[in-house]
Image (tube, grey):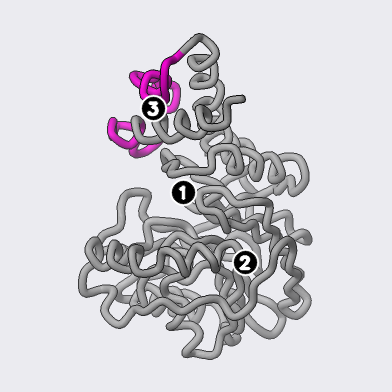
Amino acid sequence: MPRLPAILFFLGLSWAGLAHAFETVKVTDRVYALVGDLGQRSPENLGHNMTSGFIVGGDAVAVVDPGACYQDAERIAAAVRGVTDKPIRWVIDTGGQDHRWLANGWFKAHGATIIASSAARAFMEANAERQLAGVRKRVGAGCDGTEPVYPDVTFDDRHPLDLGGVTVALRYTGGAHTPGDIFVQLPQSGVLFTGDAVYAQRLLGLFEGLQRWIASLEVMRDELKPQVVIPGHGHVTDLDEALRDSYGYLTFLRDRIQARIDDGAFDAVEAAQGLDQSEFSYLKNWDQLSFRAMNAQRAAEELFSSQP
């Protein structure tokens, strides 16, 4: 684990129900990460197999990703209450994956305004029923009562947010794991919430969008340049590990498969088949052969389709 600012430490919250959901990590006096399970969605984690968080402003709080189920939203709100009694006024959906937005309704019912990119809202609308059915299947009764509620405010490029003395910059760079993924930057402290643009310590899942994902990570590297990264999956880290585990893996897929295409691979299946990904065997979930094979296949399909 790379070195991080000395202020980073675990709060060790102990109230009932949080043990299998996430750990609340204080990153700065204003920023907290909610570090969830590195495995799969389950009844125990209520679909919180990701990292989210919240930002405490001078007069209100912004939650970064509300969870997949209303019961998880209640746990997130309890984590906020363990730190501050300021109201949760905003919820920022960093993307269109289920646990980034499906619990919006709980927070909206409690007075919050929901913010996301325009591309994320379009993805949510197209995939809501499928996502909700999938979460209910994996989480079970923990998702009872959960219904899709879409963002109130959307934007196409940048959206500033003033939390009362705390400046937050929302940035859409073309998407990553899903088409609407954004970065949530706190310029004053050098902290960046990446949503699903960064998987740290865990093998990412590529469904489509290899090239856009790489391009967004290059914006993170070259323009945003965070000192502390709160990834979409994994523990709070620094830019080097974030790039190694996500950008390094995606560019590995791109470069190795493109080399096979250049050498005359007949189709995407041939370009992807048997690709040795062992240099990333340190990542959790790497041992799932079908998962690695899917990533290679999806990358090959996109690269083949983009050939002149």
Foreground residue, 70 or 200? 70
Q: Quadrant of the C terminus?
A: top right
Q: Looking at the rendered structure, which numbered label has been put on residue 281?
A: 3
Q: Is residue 281 magenta?
A: yes
Amino acid type assigned to the residue bearing label 1 in the image: Gly
Which dot, 1 or 2, sits closer to the camera?
Answer: 2
Specify few, some or many for label 2: CA neighbours under 10 Å numbering under 14, 14-19, or 20 or more.
some
Residue at 64% in and 42% down: 217
Vertical position of residue 101 compared to residue 289: above or below: below
Tag 1's secondary structure? Answer: loop
Q: Is residue 305 left or right of residue 174?
A: left
Q: Is residue 179 left or right of residue 234?
A: right
Which dot, 3 or 2, sits closer to the camera?
Answer: 2
Query: Which residue is situated farthest in the top direction here?
Result: 263
Foreground residue, 207 or 9? 207
Residue bearing mark 2: 118
Marks 3/2: CA–CA distance: 36 Å
Highlighted magenta segment, given as a residue range: 265-292
Tag 3's secondary structure? Answer: loop
Specify few, some or many for label 3: CA neighbours under 10 Å numbering under 14, 14-19, or 20 or more.
few
Residue at 30% in and 73% down: 17
Asked which quadrant contains residue 85, the reply is bottom right
Residue 4 at x, y = what percent?
Answer: 62, 46
Q: Is residue 269 magenta?
A: yes
Residue bearing mark 1: 234
Residue at 34% in and 19% down: 274
Marks 1/3: CA–CA distance: 16 Å
